[in-house]
Image (tube, grey):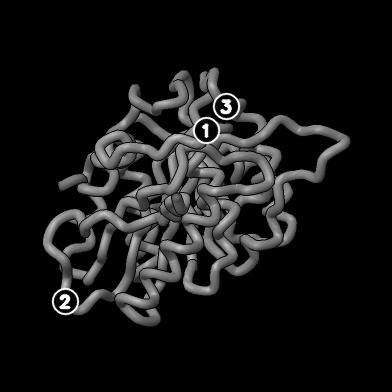
Amino acid sequence: MAQQATPVRTARLGRTLGPEPAPVSGAVLLLPGGEEVSSRRPSPMWAAASVRALGRRLARAGRDEGLAVHVVHYRYRGWNGTEAHLAGDAAWAADEVVRRYGDVPVCLAGIGMGGRAALRAGGHEAVNSVLALAPWLPEEDVAAPPEPVKQLAGRRVLIVHGTNDERTDPELSFRLAARAKKANREVCRFEVHTDGHGLHQYRDEVIALAEDFVMGVLFGRALSRPVQDAFAAPPPLGLRMPLAAGFGSSWRR
């Protein structure tokens, strides 16, 4: 009896959040969190839960600009060492945006392990910007090469991290940002004081900051003064920019 072939897993894009714009002028790919090692396939509801609030906010803010917002559904929950499955799925998703919408700018926006995927896949030719929220990064090991940053050249990069994150050390994202800043001035990082991995304590401010960044880098809207200052400031100032309580409250819709 012939053995049945094991189905090949494929990543996919979720439906656009909100009405699909016509035409599409830019895209955000939402990269949910994941695990360091796992061969399980994440459920669609699990994948969307961590990025739903951010995605809805961005879709609403970019409706008149032609913004398409998609959640990326991974093949596996795990990064899985050198396989870097989540980064591969992020790159596939950028290819899919080009196939569907043509030559439009793409922002990779990831949370936790999805933040690492966004940073790693940021070199894709369609990507002009990366948003990494509480990115999970590996502990530094003198025997292993450091997390790469050269692929971020020419991209605008915003990293946001809570200072009380006990799941992924915020100092690791600071060090990565410092290395990236040496090759690319368009890197900044905000610290959310006393907040943890989920950035729940200042969720409204974090989402407002994300909106400010995404609308600016994709559609040329003027960035808020704190974000402008963070990009312009030399290290370490622009990489330890405090996110003020109430950020965005004057223009929040």
Residue 168: image tag: 3
| Rendering coords of residue 252 (x, y %) | 20, 45
Give the amino acid at mark 1.
Ser
Counting residues from the start of the chain, the first of labels 1 and 3 encountered is 1
Counting residues from the start of the chain, the first of labels 3 and 2 encountered is 2
Residue 169: image tag: none
Write the residue at 48% across / 67% down: 127
Residue 38: image tag: 1
Left or right of 73? Residue 49 is left
Residue 60 falls in image quadrant = bottom left
Report the Cα–Cα distance between label 2 and label 1. 38 Å
Counting residues from the start of the chain, the first of labels 2 and 1 encountered is 2
Write the residue at 57% across / 27% down: 168
| Rendering coords of residue 238 (x, y %) | 59, 45
**Disc 2 designates what residue?**
22
SS under mark 2? loop
Left or right of 148? Residue 31 is left
Depth check, front residue: 158 or 246: 158
Write the residue at 49% across / 39% down: 160
Would you place residue 123 above or below residue 119 in this image? below
Depth check, front residue: 193 or 176: 176
